[in-house]
Amino acid sequence: MKVMIRHQRREVEVRGRRRVRELLVELGVNPESVLVIRGAQLLTHDAQLGDDDTIELRPVVSGGID
Amino acid sequence: MRCQRCRGDAVVEVRRHHAAFCSDHFIEFFDRQVQRAIEDERMFTRDDRVLVAVSGGKDSLALWDVLRRLGYAATGLYINLGIGGYSDDSHRKTVAYADAHGADLLVADIPQEFGMSVEELARATRRVSCSACGLSKRYLFNRVAIDHGFTVVATGHNLDDEAAVLLGNLLHWQTEYLARQSPVLSSTHPKLARKVKPLYRIAEREAAAYAIVRGIDYIVDECPNSVGAKSLLYKEALNLLEQASPGAKQSLYWGFLERGRALLGTQGVVALRACVHCGQPTTAEVCAFCRMTERAAERMRVRRGGGAGAPAAAAPVGAAGAPDAGGSG
Ligand code: SF4
Ligand SMILES: [Zn+2]
Ligand SMILES: [Zn+2]
């Protein structure tokens, strides 16, 4: 599957079925800090991902002092 | 994962509430949290005209959207900071939301009104960008609110923002800031609007989820000046705690509101008077915003060879004025 890691402006290719939770652990991403999106659909951490999927990891943490 | 309410497919987990929701029931959960924040803290009623500070990001667009859906009279205020492509994009998204939903939007333009972007203001007065920017925004939110007859200014600060500010204040035991940190800052001067944060019960991840579920197109890319901000470090630390122990953030911040702030007394309260240049409330004779813009205009004159005695070129006084007792927001 193709994983677009938006905040790091990179794309990684991951092989094999796995759950969202496992994918985030592999990529070292704290699940609190992202939403996981397939198409226009939000996914929960137990959602199963397949090889043909394109997944976006969308950061939710904004910064600045305002 | 199943929705806690209807057993349909869940799209959002809210671990701190041991819950997961489908789209409809997530919106219902979100509405309830916001309604409760407004009522518990007596922020405003449906008779108040509320000015919502909108940046084009997830939090402020979500706030504007939820307030309008809940039946509040919420007008947006977008401030053009003049930060290149970031400002252009955020402006476009804000206008697109207003057009699509028939929402009322006011726009203030810093480069147009003061002749300089917030970054140029910062450079000219040797501040960091965020300091000049924060000061300008607080000033304009209040001035526009007062000029247009709004009694309340609402900002999109969420639970994570507030918990991060609290952590920063605690790390340095900034007791005055701690005493003032609150989801509601009441008006202490006739020209000071009340400031409220109706999303303080909403985690940052939930605000983003709400925007996505509602189909709101917000600006995902960050302001370039936020890179390396301390608040990001605090948020990361809090998210590590949250992951290991769901509910850590709300326990920290809500616990502070319920039990911590009462211990601090009223040391944050300061007397305000009108700025002699712009009339906006301030603790000093001339407000911090007028001081900043006048200094910047002065430096521009010197640079252009006009000398100190030359007439003001871009002096922003007159209609201008800034509440500089800003606090954390
Ligand atoms: S990150 Fe700093 S400069 Fe950018 S919008 Fe926020 S306060 Fe302003
Ligand atoms: Zn449901
Ligand atoms: Zn002033």
Image: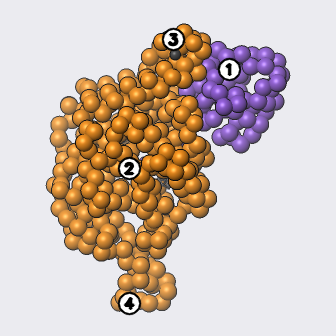
Chain colours: A purple, B orange
Mark pair 3, 1: CA separation: 23 Å
Secondary structure under the numbered disc 1 in the rendered image: helix
Question: CA gap, disc 1 to disc 4?
Answer: 64 Å
Same chain, marks 3 and 2?
Answer: yes
Q: Chain of mark 1?
A: A
Circle 3 residue: B6
Q: In the image, is the residue at mark 1 within 8 Å of ligand 2 by its beta carbon?
A: no
Task: State if disc 1 and disc 3 touch (CB < 8 Å).
Answer: no
Residue behind mark 2: B75
Q: Position of residue B303 (x, y in %)?
A: 49, 83
Instruction: Please report whichever mark, 2 or 4, sits nearer to the chain's N-terminal start.
Output: 2
Q: Quadrant of the N terminus of chain B?
A: top right
From the viewer's perspective, tell me whether residue B191 is left or right of residue A38.
Answer: left
In the image, are marks 2 and 4 on the same chain? yes
Which quadrant would residue B247 be assigned to in this image?
top left
Residue extending furthest toward the top: B7
Q: Which residue is mark 4?
A: B310
User: Is B17 drawn above or below residue B273 in the view shown?
Assistant: above
Give residue A55's quadrant in the image: top right
Relative to residue B238, is residue A28 drawn left or right? Answer: right
What amino acid is at disc 4? Ala
- Determine the residue positioned at 25% across, 42% down: B47
Percent from the top left, x then y, of residue B176? 26, 44
Determine the chain carrying the residue at label 4.
Answer: B
> Mark 2 Cα within 10 Å, few/some/many (few <14, many 20+)?
many
Asked whether disc 3 touches disc 2, contact meaning CB atoms under 8 Å apart, the reply is: no
Ranked by sequence position, the earlier of labels 3 and 2 is 3
